Amino acid sequence: MTPLIGISTNFQTVDQGKFLGMERIYVNKDYTDAVVKAGGIPLLLPPLENREILRSYVNLCQGFLLSGGGDINPILYGELPHPKLEEFHGALDRSQWMLTEEILQTDKPLLAICRGVQLLNVVCGGTLWQDISAVDHPVMLHSQNGPRAEVFHPVHLKPDSILGHLFGEQIEVNSFHHQCLHRLGKQLTATATAPDGIIEAVEMSDHRFVIGIQWHPEMLLTQSTSMLPLFQQFICQCSR
């Protein structure tokens, strides 16, 4: 049976034209394309502050992809806003927080990308660096200006991790984030790091398949097959 993959979506407010101020729900097409390429059926999940409906999403789908997006309100992890904090949406944060909680109460596979890994970490009790400039040691640039499918820096993988088994000790990735993980949440283990020590991926050992990734594998998949093993393994776990 081909698994149904629930993909979290984002809010967008129209800022010009006759639909000024109208809210839309969207997700970048690269996510749905990646799921299809790997053999799954993508299903977009509107963000709703209704736990009963969110629980229905979880019951319906065989796996979940938390997509990228904007910043998370730091009040959710007990911090004051940093001067370089960018736009956030409280209703989106609350909806995706509840959705993530519901997913983690099951053993259904979860792939969390960019904002998704940051949300996963916060839901598990961790914190974020609200901007790379706040990190307490020298760091490199993590938001590239080049095309989305261009690799930008290497990451080192733990050999005993799911990612390590898929890709070996090192891979090259793209990078489009200004926030990153700080204190890790409960039950999360860092399984990939950039050369400057920034955490690039986490896994959850007490679940069958929970992986959070800071780079954008779905974007890389538009021009190469380098990230296809990740999505194929995800879909394979969803089919079990």
Image (cartoon, rainbow, N blue to C red):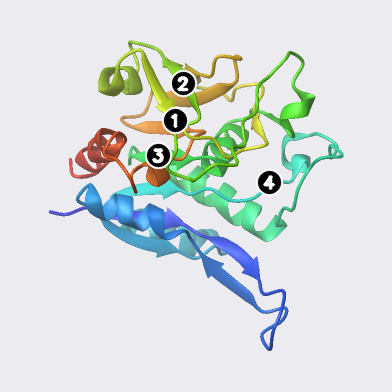
The correct choice, above or below, for 128 with respect to 95 in the image is above
> Is 36 above or below relative to 124?
below
State the image coordinates of residue 36 (x, y, percent, origin top left).
25, 55
Q: In the rendered structure, find residue 35 and report the number of the disc placed on it.
A: none
**On the image, numbered disc 1 is attached to which residue?**
173
Q: What residue is shown with label 4?
A: 71
The numbered mark, 3 or 4, whose residue comes first in the sequence reads: 4
Residue denoted by label 2: 154
* Cβ atoms at labels 1 and 3 below 8 Å apart: yes
In terms of sequence position, does the residue under pointer 3 or pointer 2 come before the other? 2
Amino acid type, residue under disc 1 in the picture: Val
Mark 1 vs 4, N-terminal side? 4
Rendered-image quadrant of the C terminus: top left
Q: Which of the two marks, 2 or 4, is nearer to us in this view?
A: 2
User: Helix or strand or loop: what does disc 3 sit on?
Assistant: helix
The amino acid on which the numbered mark 2 sits, given as a three-letter code, is Pro
The disc placed on residue 217 is 3
Label located before the other in sequence (1 or 3)? 1
User: In which quarter of the view is residue 138 placed?
Assistant: top right
Amino acid under disc 4: Asp
In the image, what residue type sits under mark 3?
A: Pro
Marks 2 and 3: in contact by CB < 8 Å? no
